[in-house]
Amino acid sequence: MLKMKPNCEHCDLDLPNDSSDAMICSYECTFCADCVSDVLENVCPNCGGGFKKRPTRPTKEWRDGVSASHQPPSDERFLKPVDLEAHLKFASKIKNISPRNR
Ligand SMILES: [Zn+2]
Ligand SMILES: [Zn+2]
């Protein structure tokens, strides 16, 4: 189950459950869409993987015991701005490899 982290790890933008800007890697490192495209070049600074849009957890209980009120999104903010120079170096080797082949 995803934690659904509440903010962008780099710029601290709020990324609530219904945000269209929340992007995650396979480890659920969480960034906003602008940071993924403009800063990270679709390379996760923590694992080197690519990003996809985070799904929204249903707020309505369509199935018994399953909804955003039963399994609430995390309210634990995590902030670790990337070192831009170090990331450029890291990403330069990785960004041209398709995320499916990394
Ligand atoms: Zn951001
Ligand atoms: Zn990652």
Image: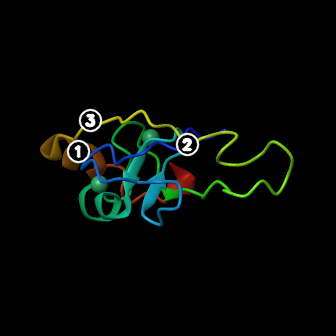
* Residue 67 image point, x, y percent: 71, 49
The residue where tag 3 is placed is 80
Q: Of residues 10 and 62, which is closer to you in this image?
A: 62
Q: Of residues 27 and 19, which is closer to you in this image?
A: 19
Q: Is residue 77 left or right of residue 50?
A: left
Q: CA distance from mark 3 to mark 2?
A: 20 Å
User: Disc 2 or 1, which lies upstream in sequence?
Assistant: 2
Residue sitting at 56 percent across and 38 percent down?
3
Q: Amino acid at mark 3?
A: Lys
Q: Is residue 49 left or right of residue 69?
A: left
Q: Quadrant of residue 97?
A: bottom left
> Which of pointers 3 and 2 indicates the residue nearer the eye?
2
User: Disc 3 or 1, which lies upstream in sequence?
Assistant: 3
The residue where tag 2 is placed is 73
Q: CA distance from mark 2 to mark 1?
A: 29 Å
Q: Amino acid at mark 1?
A: His
Q: How is the image coloured?
A: rainbow
Under circle 2, the secondary element is loop
> Which of pointers 2 and 1 indicates the residue nearer the eye?
2
The residue where tag 1 is placed is 87
User: 7 above or below 39?
Assistant: above
Q: CA distance from mark 3 to mark 1?
A: 13 Å
Residue 68 numbered tag: none
Q: Amino acid at mark 2?
A: Pro
